[in-house]
Image (cartoon, rainbow, N blue to C red):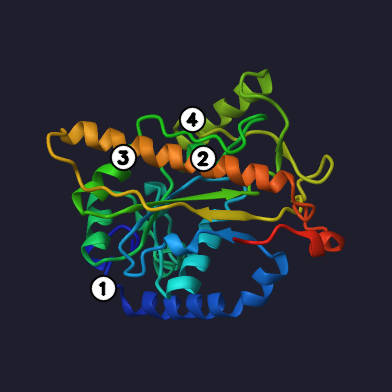
Amino acid sequence: MSVTKIDEIMNQPSHVQTLRRAVEAVADGVDPLVNLYRPYVDGLENLPRDGRFLLVGNHTQFGTETLLIPYVVRREIGMRVRPLTDRRFGDMPRPVSDVMAACGAVVGSPEGAGELMAHDEPVMVFPGGGREIGKFKGEQYKLRWEGRAGFARVAIEHGYPIVPVALVGGDDVYVGVTTRDHWLGRLSQSIGEKLTGQRDMAVPLVRGIGPTLIPRPQRMYLRFAEPIGTAKPARTTDARWVATVKERTQESLEQSLGGLLTLRAEDPYRELNPLAWRNATRSG
């Protein structure tokens, strides 16, 4: 598949390149639609202009971050973001895998990330992976990075600064009906395990508007934090430095999420009420 072959990461087949041009044409034409929803975007000055940076973000239930972050970065610095995806996506049949490749996606692996970094490409990763998408009641905007430090290791190896990027709004489109420990929550986890083969890939019960699955209108809030350097200090072991970079990234991202949640709570436009637009919180 195009999203898994290392030799195709930088030299994509002609049909994928054609799809890429089509995808970029669509992206260039959606400005009016994006502006209609008026996302809050802060910290664009923290994006290195040379493209050598690793974006590390939080996954939400609605998945808005996977589209909005690359869109904003491309609009700001004119470069395509290369998302690192779950290996299962790489096993998808064509044309799905071709479309993902056209969007820049590469299956997350040290080899794939290293190839992108060797060519100074902006890279994006969500360390929580798919297990961070399914949210039970009370789990909104909680990072689930247990044992996930590979992003820090590969960034250190290639001298890539890390830019934490937080998104708030995506976990409010749907509301979890039960907690993880509720019997319905345990049932959801069992179903998720049968479908994916992984216990932590739950399919929680959620609702949108009222008791339906119609998405609740929500404004999105995006913040790019200050870059985190990855150059290892002298007399620091490799393992200790990887853990330190991971901890600093997680702390920065959690701080940004907390700040955005506070900002969102005070924004009368948070539910996209057009009557409140005049008083909406402005982007920094």
Along the line of sight, the residue nearer the viewer: 248 or 60? 248
Observer-side mark, 4 or 3, equals 3
Around disc 3, counting alpha carbons within 10 Å, would you say few (fewer than 14), some (14 to 19), or many (20 or more)?
many
Label located before the other in sequence (1 or 3): 1
State the CA–CA distance, disc 2 to disc 1: 38 Å
Label located before the other in sequence (4 or 1): 1
State the CA–CA distance, disc 4 to disc 1: 35 Å
Circle 3 sits on which residue?
245
Q: Which mark is residue 200?
A: 4
State the CA–CA distance, disc 4 to disc 3: 25 Å
Is residue 241 placed above or below 80 in the rendered structure?
above
Q: Is residue 4 visible?
A: yes
Q: Identify residue type, mark 4.
A: Asp
Label located before the other in sequence (3 or 2): 3
Q: Whole-percent x and y of residue 80?
A: 40, 70
Q: Identify residue type, mark 1.
A: Asn
Q: Residue at x 37, y 78 (%)?
A: 17
Label located before the other in sequence (2 or 1): 1
Circle 2 sits on which residue?
255
**Considering the numbered disc 1 on the image, is that residue within a helix, a strand or a loop?**
loop
Q: In which image quadrant can residue 103 be found?
A: bottom left
The image quadrant where one finds the C terminus is: bottom right
Q: Which mark is residue 11?
A: 1
Q: Whole-percent x and y of residue 154?
A: 25, 48
Observer-side mark, 4 or 2, equals 2
114 sits to left or right of 138: left
**Considering the numbered disc 2 on the image, is that residue within a helix, a strand or a loop?**
helix
Around disc 2, counting alpha carbons within 10 Å, would you say few (fewer than 14), some (14 to 19), or many (20 or more)?
some
Around disc 4, counting alpha carbons within 10 Å, would you say few (fewer than 14), some (14 to 19), or many (20 or more)?
some
Q: Are marks 2 and 1 in contact (CB under 8 Å)?
A: no
